[in-house]
Image (spheres, coloured by chain):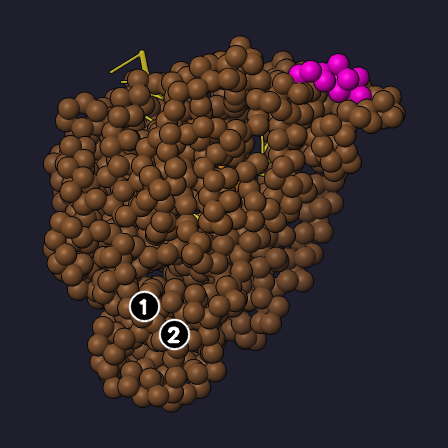
Chain colours: A brown, B orange, C yellow
DNA sequence: TATTTCACG
DNA sequence: ACGTACGTGAAATAA
């Protein structure tokens, strides 16, 4: 029988692992002083990529010493020279990497005179001859030359947990060549990372063109004389030796004499004892917890248990759903349910398959969505009697709505719970989040592929197993997740805020916001005319044509050719951001034009073209998705399109809002927003008497702050500049003040900013105390909380690096404020939604923009809606400070603000 | 894919 | 001495 052989390029992956977590280098140090970033990433890689693969053989190949001791070093003295020497922080992790490989049940191998590539090349051919299936995992594209029908190369992209799968077809599609030609491509281009050259001036594009025409290097040189004269032809002729040397360097050995064979590298799964020992030594707390929870899940197999057996035990057999099985399922009172779709945008994605079941009757799946016409299935979805467990209730509500059903009886939304437990590292993917609880599930990418490669597998069984296992995972994780939630005192936040909110949001999304496309298109035309004339003027003034959208070309013009002073740099060159251009404007008239061009280009591309592209032609509406489990603070975010950043601050941009209109004639748009909600939250949670007083008396808070920091009398007039400064200070306080930030914002000296802050803290002492206290709490507990126990962990709070740590401290101050404000408007949304239903209003909530709610309603309902919404928002929560709501209405969103 | 810029709160 | 204001998403360019 054909076996699965896994060959891993240890060096390239370890390197990738080190740099994948390079930013966390500082944070990942054991008490003994050992850095562990590469080890953590490598462990993730082994768990997420290797473990689910369950190969029959597994080997990790390492380079023996340096490249110079291999034949390639003899062939070309500079081979791999100039490579950054591995930092000490990396080298110290090497011995443990090998131990980790062993503990995971894989074999290490290296051999003098060979590189890891050659070991892999040789073994892949051995496996191929034996009729086995070979999978190579590496970060080095060179290895793709080994690809055949039986040999697949998985190349890590971005970090170590995402891979691109190279098959002969894929290579043909991507480069238009065969795997064998990869070597000749390298021969022509050389390799900068291994520091050997190819033919002068030949890069990837040229090389591929040449190979398409001449197929290989030998044939190319056989016909080089027939090429028509060109610089390239000369280069090819001159560099012939270089090319052939490069080809030798790039060719991986496939017939090396190895001291091992396939029989020596059998894989029998991880060794629990070895893993525990290693993880304890490295202080991997999470990994240890994961191991322990797995041991509990496994059938008490004890120390002899290996992961493969446990894995099998984890998942039930998934059966194809039938009417008979539905009959049994509908009698249950607890069921997990899951639908897989072809894309993230559940408003339009196709539904692939669905599954349901529980631990008693088992798990069932189907690709036949006509089953949703069946009464039993409708009952399961729509009845309150059956408590459902899902991953992402909001998405499922919308999908089921598309099928003509209304989701009811949701008890457990694993996505919401996982997000509330810990916002950090949440990618909204079931397999990842399940991993936190020690449950390992195939990823969607493994089943469906991704990008252009996305395809639903032909075999029904593969798909049904996948969705069935998802349902099972969600079913199994409920109790553990809920008990964690209780420990965090987050039961109320989940049951009374986030879960009910998800259905309010689902309805808002499904409803959509009507867009006047003609109006938008007309605005676009006018903008295009202005853009064209601005462009012409700019070219005239510059004396040349260039791409104004290119910061690089613009920088060259302004700073190199025109010699304007460089105010700020980015990591790649000159900054041309607004703040910089505004400073340059008095010196060069062209800059004003560029600013105007930029503004218009932005409006046109993002808000005219961008918006028109996502209007659903069936109903002339945009259907955003509010991401409820993304932000670190508890706010929502909005995508496809983002309705939370429609222009407002400039009149030209604000006109875009004219295109957002009610969905019915004689209806209005109505907007209600909280005034100063974050400062009110701050006053409330710090209990500062001065600030409290200002809000209770409904004073102008920025003017009041100005009187305090400028030492004016209680009723003294405040000039515009003083108010502006005070406003900036208030903003700074909410953001977690720093003198540097304030000085930059106000364009004043840092020491002046510092003295503003000192005065502020003297005048508002309770705020000062709270800021100190919250930072201390963060240092002690590692997290901060909002008024509703929303939690944000701050992994950097004890970092050695000043900047990293300071960032975490500002976050500790800002998150409870921003997050509590988010809590409040979420509560208000649920209550408003209920009030509208109870009063039988036709009005509909459409959008939330952090401190603002937007509705549409019949004209005659406006007064009642205004009364209802403002009262409910006012009274959403009980604070020591009154909340204040302002509202506006009109025929479009433009007037409703 | 990463970086820069800019739209919002 | 260090070099950040907090939280987002989309588009364009460069690589």
Residue A647 picture location, percent across and down = 52, 49
* Cβ atoms under marks 1 and 2 closer than 8 Å: yes
Q: What element carries label 2?
A: strand
Image quadrant in which you'd find residue A138 = top left
Residue closest to the eye, A717 or A7: A7
What residue is drawn where x is 31% and y is 88%? A327
Residue A883 picture location, percent across and down = 25, 56
Q: Which quadrant would the N terminus of chain A be assigned to in this image? A: bottom left
Q: What chain does badge 2 belong to?
A: A
> Is A306 on the left-hand or right-hand side of A465?
left
Q: Give the range drawn in magenta.
A: A233-242
Q: How crowded is mark 2: few (under 14 residues within 10 Å), some or many (20 or more)?
A: many
Examine the rendered structure and indicate whether residue A340 appears above or below residue A156: below
Q: How far apart are marks 1 and 2 (CA)?
A: 9 Å
How many discs appear?
2
Residue closest to the eye, A391 or C5: A391
> Is A598 on the left-hand or right-hand side of A313?
right
The residue that disc 2 covers is A365
Give the mark nearest the N terminus, 1 or 2: 2
Residue A8 picture location, percent across and down = 40, 37
- Mark in the foreground, 1 or 2: 2
- Residues marked 1 and 2, same chain: yes
Q: Residues within 10 Å of mark 1 (few under 14, many from 20)?
A: many
The residue that disc 1 covers is A471
Examine the rendered structure and indicate whether residue A598 appears above or below residue A443: above
Q: What chain does badge 1 belong to?
A: A
Residue A410 visible in the displayed image: no
Image quadrant in which you'd find residue A752 = top left
Q: What secondary structure characterizes most of the magenta part? A: helix
């Amino acid at each position: 029988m054909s076996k699965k052989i896994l060959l891993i390029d240890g060096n390239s992956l370890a390197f990738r692992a080190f740099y994948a977590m390079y930013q966390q280098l500082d944070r990942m140090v054991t008490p003994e002083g050992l850095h562990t970033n590469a080890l953590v990433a490598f462990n993730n890689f082994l768990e997420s990529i290797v473990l689910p693969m369950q190969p029959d053989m597994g080997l990790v190949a390492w380079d023996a010493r340096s490249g110079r001791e291999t034949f390639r070093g003899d062939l070309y003295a500079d081979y791999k020279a100039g490579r950054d020497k591995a930092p000490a922080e990396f080298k110290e992790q090497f011995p443990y990497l090998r131990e980790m490989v062993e503990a995971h049940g894989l074999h290490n191998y290296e051999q003098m005179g060979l590189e890891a590539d050659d070991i892999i090349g040789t073994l892949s051919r051995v496996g191929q001859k034996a009729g086995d299936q070979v999978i190579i995992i590496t970060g080095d594209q060179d290895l793709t030359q080994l690809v055949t029908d039986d040999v697949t190369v998985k190349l890590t992209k971005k970090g170590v947990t995402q891979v691109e799968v190279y098959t002969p077809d894929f290579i043909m599609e991507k480069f238009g060549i065969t795997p064998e030609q990869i070597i000749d491509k390298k021969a022509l281009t050389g390799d900068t990372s291994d520091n050997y050259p190819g033919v002068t001036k030949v890069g990837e594009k040229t090389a591929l063109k040449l190979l398409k025409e001449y197929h290989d290097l030998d044939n190319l040189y056989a016909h080089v004389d027939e090429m028509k004269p060109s610089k390239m032809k000369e280069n090819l002729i001159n560099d012939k030796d270089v090319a052939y040397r490069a080809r030798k360097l790039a060719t991986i050995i496939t017939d090396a004499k190895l001291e091992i064979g396939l029989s020596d590298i059998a894989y029998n799964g991880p060794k629990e004892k070895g893993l525990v020992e290693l993880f304890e030594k490295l202080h991997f707390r999470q990994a240890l917890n994961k191991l322990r929870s797995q041991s509990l899940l496994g059938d008490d197999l004890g120390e002899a248990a290996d992961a493969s057996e446990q894995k099998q035990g984890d998942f039930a057999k998934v059966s194809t759903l039938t009417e008979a099985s539905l009959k049994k399922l509908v009698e249950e009172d607890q069921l997990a349910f899951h639908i897989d779709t072809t894309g993230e945008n559940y408003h339009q994605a196709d539904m692939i398959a669905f599954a349901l079941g529980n631990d008693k009757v088992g798990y069932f799946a189907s690709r036949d969505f006509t089953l949703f016409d069946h009464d039993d299935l409708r009952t399961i979805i729509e009845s309150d009697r059956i408590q459902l467990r899902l991953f992402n209730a909001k998405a499922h509500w919308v999908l089921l709505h598309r099928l003509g059903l209304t989701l009811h009886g949701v008890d457990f939304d694993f996505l919401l719970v996982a997000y509330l437990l810990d916002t950090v590292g949440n990618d909204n993917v079931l397999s990842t989040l399940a991993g936190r609880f020690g449950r390992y599930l195939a990823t969607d990418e493994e089943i469906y592929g991704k990008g252009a490669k996305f395809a639903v597998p032909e075999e029904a069984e593969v798909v049904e197993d996948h969705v069935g296992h998802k349902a099972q995972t969600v079913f199994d994780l409920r109790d553990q997740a809920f008990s964690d939630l209780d420990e965090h005192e987050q039961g109320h936040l989940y049951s009374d805020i986030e879960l009910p909110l998800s259905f309010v949001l689902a309805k808002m999304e499904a409803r959509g916001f009507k867009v006047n496309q003609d109006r938008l298109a007309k605005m676009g035309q006018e903008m295009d005319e202005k853009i064209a004339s601005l462009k012409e003027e700019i070219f005239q003034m510059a004396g040349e044509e260039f791409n104004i959208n290119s910061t690089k070309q613009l920088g060259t013009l302004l700073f190199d050719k025109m010699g304007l002073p460089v105010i700020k740099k980015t990591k790649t060159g000159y900054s041309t951001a607004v703040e910089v251009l505004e400073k340059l404007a008095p010196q060069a008239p062209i800059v004003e034009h560029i600013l105007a061009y930029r503004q218009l280009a932005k409006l046109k591309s993002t808000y005219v073209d961008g918006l028109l592209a996502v209007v659903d032609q069936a109903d002339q509406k945009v259907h955003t998705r509010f991401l409820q489990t993304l932000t670190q603070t508890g706010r929502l975010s909005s995508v496809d399109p983002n309705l939370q950043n429609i222009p407002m601050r400039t009149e030209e941009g604000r006109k875009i809002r004219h295109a957002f209109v009610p969905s019915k004639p004689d209806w209005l748009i109505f907007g209600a927003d909280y005034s100063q909600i974050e400062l009110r939250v701050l006053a409330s949670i710090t209990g500062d008497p001065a600030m409290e007083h200002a809000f209770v008396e409904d004073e102008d808070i920025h003017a009041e702050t100005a009187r305090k920091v400028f030492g004016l009398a209680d009723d003294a007039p405040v000039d515009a500049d003083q108010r502006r400064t005070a406003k900036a200070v208030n903003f700074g306080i909410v953001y977690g003040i720093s003198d540097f930030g304030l000085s930059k914002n106000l364009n004043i000296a840092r020491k002046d900013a510092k003295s503003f802050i000192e005065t502020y803290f003297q005048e508002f002492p309770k705020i000062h105390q709270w800021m100190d206290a919250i930072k201390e709490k963060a240092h002690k507990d590692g997290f901060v909380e909002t008024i509703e126990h929303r939690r944000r962990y701050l992994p950097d709070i004890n970092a050695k690096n000043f900047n990293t740590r300071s960032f975490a401290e500002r976050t500790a101050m800002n998150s409870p404020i921003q997050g509590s404000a988010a809590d409040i408007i979420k509560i208000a949304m649920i209550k408003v939604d209920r009030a509208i239903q109870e009063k039988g209003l036709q009005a509909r909530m459409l959008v939330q923009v952090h401190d603002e709610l937007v509705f549409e309603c019949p004209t005659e309902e406006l007064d009642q809606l205004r009364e209802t919404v403002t009262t409910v928002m006012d009274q959403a929560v009980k604070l020591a400070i009154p909340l204040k709501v302002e509202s506006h209405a009109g025929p479009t969103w433009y007037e409703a603000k």
